[in-house]
Amino acid sequence: DAKTTQPNSMESNEEEPVHLPCNHSTISGTDYIHWYRQLPSQGPEYVIHGLTSNVNNRMASLAIAEDRKSSTLILHRATLRDAAVYYCILRGILTGGGNKLTFGTGTQLKVEL
Amino acid sequence: DTGVSQDPRHKITKRGQNVTFRCDPISEHNRLYWYRQTLGQGPEFLTYFQNEAQLEKSRLLSDRFSAERPKGSFSTLEIQRTEQGDSAMYLCASSSSDRVLSGELFFGEGSRLTVL
């Protein structure tokens, strides 16, 4: 799977929007962009995924650049419960390993009052 | 609770002892994954099953590690002759092959191993 690059950490104030960037310049045409997050002392949880078009769900929005070499996870109103490590992951639909995901080190999001 | 459950949540053992972790996936999921996570790092893939077949093993899975999923439901991960470097969080995840395009994995809360 192609590699992603994320900032090590970001800070936000509560109730403000948060934009978490991810660079994936070597993405291939069959790579999906997935975002997971991991709250303290818990396993990762799915946030959102997309291929080419921007995506919205109840948790977040995913904005994908036109050339697909970068994407941004948008939390519209951060809360203290959103403090977590956010992982941007590429998964090739044509690769083996079932739905196996390859995690990097992610972005530690800190949310302050 | 119909999520992925793991047992035990915490295990402290002495170097050289064997330990076994159990994972019960979401009942309708036919795929099961094991990951290991050390402090400050993202989860690292160890192995995955589709039904009872172990289809992929990482090079991280040394000879001291063995995973089984005998009836295609729960899975066990055994570590023999534990070493201090085995101290980590062991995470289990499950998914359905019917959702191959979404690729959503559902993780348990993990089993934390401390080797003294």
Image: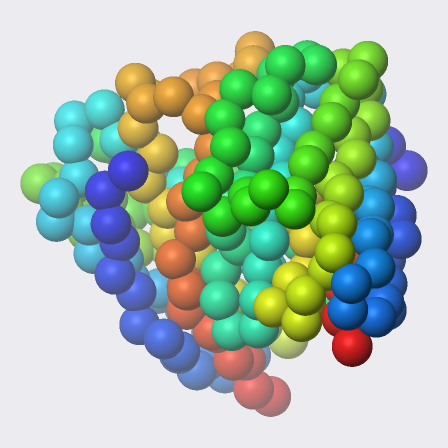
Give the x, y percent position of residue B112.
Answer: 76, 62
Residue drawn at x 78%, y 30% as measured from the top left: B75
Which quarter of the figure has residue A8?
bottom left
State the image coordinates of residue A92 (x, y, percent, origin top left).
30, 28
Residue B115 versus residue A34 in the image, above or below: below
Q: Looking at the picture, tell me which residue is in the foreground, B15 or A104.
A: B15
Pick the residue in front: A40 or A67: A40
Residue under the point 70% across and 14% down: B52
Give the vertical position of A8 relative to B9 (above or below). below
- Choose between A38 and A99: the one closer to the eye: A99
What is the x, y in percent for residue A80?
64, 75
The colour scheme of the drawn protein is rainbow
In the shown orientation, is residue A102 left or right of residue A7?
right
Residue that extends furthest to the bottom in the rendered view of this protein: A113
Q: Residue at x 43, y 56 (%)?
A: A87
Considering only vertical position in the picture, is A78 above or below A4?
below
- Name the side, left or right, on which B49 lies relative to A65: right
The answer to whether one can see residue A108 in this image is yes
Report the quarter where the C terminus of chain A lies: bottom right
Between B55 and A4, the one lying in front of the other is: B55
B103 relative position to B67: left or right: left
Q: How many marks?
A: 0
Q: Quadrant of the N terminus of chain A?
A: top left
**Relative to B45, is B87 on the left or the right?**
right
Question: Which residue is depicted at the point 9% across and 40% down?
Answer: A67
Residue A45 appears anywhere in the view: no
